[in-house]
Amino acid sequence: MLVHLSIRNYAIVEQLDLELRAGMSVITGETGAGKSIMLDALGLALGDRTDSGVVRPGADKADILASFDLGSIAEAQQWLAERDLDNDGPCILRRVITAEGRSRAYINGTPCPLADLKHLGELLIDIHSQHEHQSLLKPDTHRRLLDAYAGGGELARQVQLAAQRWRQTRSELERLSRSSEEQHARQQLLSYQLEELDNLALGSHELEQLEQEHKTLGNAESLLGACRQVLELCSESDSGNVLGALTSSLQRLNGGPGQPAALEEAVNLLASAQIQVEEAVSSLNRFLDHFEADPQRLQQIEERLDSIYSLARKHRILPTELHALQEQLRGELQALHADDAAVERLGAELEAYARHYREKAGELSALRREAAGRLAAAVETEMQRLGMPGGRFAIALQPSDSAELQPQGQEQVEFQVSANPGQPLKGLARVASGGELSRISLAIQVITAQTSRVPTLVFDEVDVGIGGPTAEVVGQLLRRLGERGQVITVTHLPQVAAQGHQHLFVHKERGSSETRTAVAQLGHNQRIEEVARMLGGLDLTRESLAHARKMVQGAQRAAAA
C-alpha cells in the first residue's frame, strides 16, 4: 500500500509530505486548494506523461516520490526481483521533471524507462476518477471492466495477441499471393532459360579448349605445309640442309690432330645443336604422322561454338559469363520456389493461429457469460442502494458478425440500464442522465474494485452529482472497501468524509509574496469541525457541529458493529 507521498515544487505545491495508513483516507478542502493536484502528482510518480508546465514557477525542477509497502503484493515483488530492482525496505518510485521539460524516472534509486514506472504503478494503485463517467459510454470500457471482474485479463490479452498474429500472417500471405501470378510467369521463364543452359552443359574450361582446337584445325593446311618446309630445310634438301651442314662442320673441326683447346667449346655447341635439330626433326615427323585434319571434327567444333556464342548473344553477355549466369538463374529460381514454400507455410500458420484464437476466445466467451450475470446483479443491487429504486442493469453479449478474427473476442460487450421501473433496457449511452451516470459509474467502480488485486484504490471525486441519503451510502461503500485494503478518496460530501478512517485537510497558506498548498492530518475535534464546515459553510454553529459529531460517531459505531 502507499505509505508516503512527497511532493516538491509541483504546481502550487512547494513542499508536501503525506503519511498514509491502511483503511479509508478522505481528502477534503475548498475548491482550488489543491486536492486533485496531489493525485495528479501521484499519477506522475506512477508513470503518467507530463510537461514542463507542472514545475512551480521559480523552481528548476519538480520532484515527486511515492513509497509503497509491498508486503502483500507478491506480483510487484516478483516484477522487481526479475529486474534486480528489489530491496529490503519499501519500494520507492520517483519522478523528476525539469523546468526545460526533461523527465527522469527511478525505481528504488535506479533510473528506469517511463514504461517500467507505469507498469509497476499499475500493480500498486488503481485510480478511479470522475472522468470515468464519460468513459462508461464506450463499449471498450464495458469489455475491459467485465474482463477485469471475471479475472480474464490475461486470457483477453492472449486473444488479442492471437488475433494480431493471425492478421499479420494473413497480410503477409496476401502479399505473397498477390505476386504469385508474376512469380509463376517468372518461374516459367527462368526454368526455360536454365534448361537451355543445363542442356548446353558447358564445361569449366571447354570454351578455351574448343577455341584452341578450332584455331588449330582451321589452319591445318598452312600448318602442315610449314612443317614439311622446315623438315626440308633441316634434313631432306639435297642441295643442302641444316643437319648436313652441322655434320660437315663437326667433321672439319674434328678432322686434324692437335686440335686447340679453344675450339672445344665451339665443337660442343655444334654437337648440341646437331642433337637438338635431330630431336626437332623427329618431333615434326611424329606430328605429321599423327595429325589428322579432320573436316568432320572441325564442323563439330564450329557447331558447338556456334551454340555457345548464340546463347551468349541471346542473354547479351560474353560467352565466358555463361557459367555465372547459370548460377544466378538457379539461385533466383530457388528463391521463387522458397516463396512457394513460404505461401504453404504461412497458410498452415494462419490456420494454426485461427485454431488457437478460437480456443482462447471460446474460453474467454464462457468466462464472460458466467461473470456477466454476477456483475450485472451486483451493480443492480448497488444502483438501488444509491437512490435508483427499481433500476435494472444488464450486460449484453452480442456475437460479432464480422468474418475477421476480432482482437476483443467473439462478442461485443454492452452495458444496458433501465433507470426507472417499467422502462426497457437500453444502452447506457442512450438512457442515463448526468446524475444517473454518476451513480451507475460509482456502483460499477465499487463492485469491480472488490475483485481488484491492487491493494490501493484511489477515488477522485467519483461522488460528483450525488447528494442526500445516497451520499451516505456512497461513504459506507467506500469505507467497506477500505476495510479490505487501502482507499484514498477525494470528496466534497460530508457524508463521505465522515466515513473515513483518516482525514486529510488540504488548504492554502498565503504568505507575503506567494500562496502554497498545505495538508494537515485532522484529529477527532478538527475532523468534526471540517465535516461541519462541509455541512454548513464557514460559520460553524452548534447545530452543524452536533450534526457533524453525530455523523462521525455514527460511522464509527456502524463500523464497530
Image (cartoon, grey):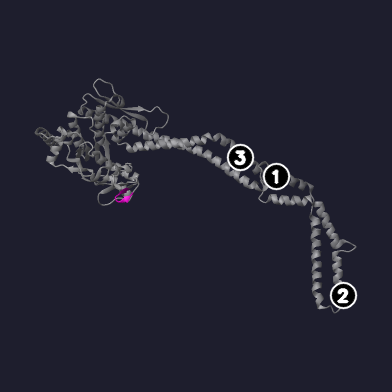
- What whole-number distance in Å separates the C-alpha atoms at marks 2 and 1? 64 Å
- What whole-number distance in Å separates the C-alpha atoms at marks 2 and 3? 81 Å
* Residue 362 showing in the rendered view: yes
* Residue 347 showing in the rendered view: no
Residue 203 point in image, percent of width and height:
66, 49
Q: Which residue is mark 1?
A: 309
Q: Secondary structure at mark 2?
A: loop
- Circle 1 packing at 10 Å, graded few (<14), some (14-19), many (20+), is some
Residue 495 point in image, percent of width and height:
17, 33
Quick check: 268 above or below 365? Answer: below
Residue 190 numbered tag: 3
Which stretch appears magenta? 105-111
- Circle 3 packing at 10 Å, graded few (<14), some (14-19), many (20+), is some
Q: Amino acid at mark 1?
A: Tyr
Residue 504 point in image, percent of width and height:
19, 41
Q: Nearer the viewer, residue 323 or 96?
A: 96
Q: Would residue 108 be counted in the magenta stretch?
A: yes
